[in-house]
Amino acid sequence: MEAFQEGSARERWSLGRLESFIDSLWERHVRHLLVCVGIFALFFFSEFSEYRLRVDDELLTHHPDALFWIAKGRWGTFLFQSLQLHPPLNPYFALLLFAVFLAASFLIFCRAVRVEVTLLVLASFALFAGFPVWHYIVEFKSTLFSNGVALFLASLAGASFGFKRFSGRLLFVILVAFCVSIYQSAVLVSWTVAVGAALRSKECRGFAAFARFLGKLFAVTLTALILYALIWKVSMSFAGLAPIYIADFFHPEELLRSPGGVLGRTACVAVSLYGGWNVVFRGLLGFSGLLFALGLASGLFPSEVPEGLSSGGFLLRALGLATLLLSPFLFHLVSGGRLPYRVLLAVPFVYWFVAYSAMTSRWSMVRVSSKLLAILVVLQFLQLQSYASFSQEFVAVHDELTASQVYERIVEVVDDFDLHKEYWVDFAGALPFPNEVSYLRGHTATTGSSVFEWDDGHPVRIRNYLGLLGMSNLRVITDRTRCRIADRVAEMPLWPAAGSVRDIDGIVVVRFGDYPDWIVRRMERLRELKLCRSQPAARKRGGRRRLRRGRKGSVARPPAAAGDAADREERLPERPQ
């Protein structure tokens, strides 16, 4: 009986501890997490409320497997997609999970830099979530969930670097290797979080201590990258793939050849983003940069100077802040100073850290001014997101109407058109969309750009987009077939003039413009190898030529393509995300 009572008491104690733990988790973390997710949803409300097809949405839906992610160096993304953890087009669920991981990353960063989560911190999350860089990530729905996981793991890795034991370093290596395998730029987040934590740590009280910290951080990060590279190499060997995509951005020779030019371009991008006059801010007034400047002044003259910091403390703080500001741009040094904005995942961390320093300055005038500026900056960030949503709405309507018109013209060209039969097609050139309300257009973002103009007009991309809209009985010809009819295609009028959609030897050609340079180079290469030869235009005859078709459910072979590999659709050139 006593044993039973003792067991019951122990059980009640265990349940009490569990209940206490859950209450503590809710009070300290879950409530904060939900508030942050709600703030994120405020900025990206249009993404949650409706869905429009964007450029690249058609890409993954037509890939039979996820092996191409391994070739891109993102074997972690391959694991996610192989496990069906994020179907290519699942925008709402993926966006919600990304919001959760982003909020968790922010809270981890706060913990790493020793900032207690208060009402001011939660309100200032709007500066973090609304920073325009996140738009470049959100627009790629197919990788949104996995990128959120990479962001979370990178933040956790940066926070774990402060652990003094060997286990902390080992955890850092494992987490960084995996987050880099999902999205290479995530390593800069881990580096930034670690540097930010060091600035608030009493361990780095002098130049020698700070130099040792940077040396350890570099060594451990390099170890993680080597582990990532080894796993990538083994994965490519098993899959029989060759690396793609990374070589397009990795140009360390430019730093050796022209260090001044690379450093200048990198500094220009950094200053423009922190200063608020970069193109991503769409000409807004410089409130963002003014808030950042107040934060820098507050960071150089903090309210509390750590004990043991000598008269050289100001120089040490300046060096630490400079290291923090440059951390998100380290990849620019090995890429010639040119990278898409979507790789700058660490910039919002730095911006919030500096802005929060201004809002907690020891000078009351700076604190009040910074909070007023923060409100204006948040309103401007909301306006920027509205610009992007407004622009995307118009381009989505344009693409849907254009696709419908193109398909209707194809039906008119083909005699006895049958929806259950497949037809050979080609789309020549690009169809620009002069979107007068476009935002983020023309600098590495797909928002505001039409499917019919991306990649200077890609036939397979256009065909895949039509397929997503239900117009799926079209097949794109190969380059060998294309170079045989190129001369006659050049004689066609441009869309939407009469004759811009024409049957040429059993191939329906839609001419938006001239073939892009990358297609012309491939056709010239085939001519050099004497694998194709242009055919002269046939004399015009009355009536329309009937397309040669196979049996129902099959696709006819173009007459000009007999004997070549015309039954293989050309693949999309892999574009970075």
Image (tube, rainbow, N blue to C red):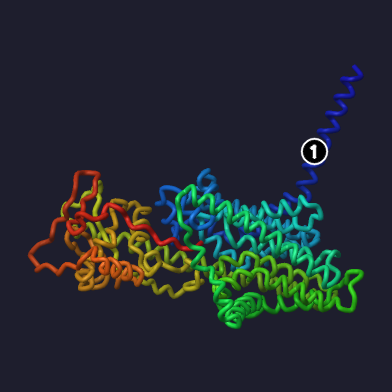
The part of the image, by quadrant, that contains residue 147 is bottom right
> Is 137 left, or right, of 492 in this rendering?
right
Could you tell me which residue is drawn at 50 percent across and 69 percent down?
444
Image coords of residue 267 (percent x, y)? 63, 79
Could you tell me which residue is drawn at 35 percent across and 53 percent down?
467
- Between 526 and 146, the one nearer to me in the picture: 526
| Residue under pointer 1 | 19
Q: Amino acid at mark 1?
A: Glu
Image coords of residue 538 (percent x, y)? 11, 67
Label 1 residue SS: helix
How many marks overall?
Answer: 1
Q: Quadrant of the N terminus?
A: top right
> Is 174 left, or right, of 46 in this rendering?
right
Kindly tell me whether residue 38 is visible in this rendering: no
- Between 462 and 382, the one nearer to me in the picture: 462
Q: Is residue 215 above or below residue 364?
A: above
Image coords of residue 13 (percent x, y)? 86, 32
Q: Is residue 547 above or below residue 339?
A: above
- Between 476 and 438, the one nearer to me in the picture: 476
The part of the image, by quadrant, that contains residue 119 is bottom right
The part of the image, by quadrant, that contains residue 184 is bottom right
- Tell me if mark 1 has few (under 14), some (14-19) or many (20+) residues whose alpha carbon lies within 10 angstroms of its own: few
Kindly tell me whether residue 256 is visible in this rendering: yes
Image coords of residue 362 (percent x, y)? 85, 74
In the rendered image, the residue lying farthest to the top is 1
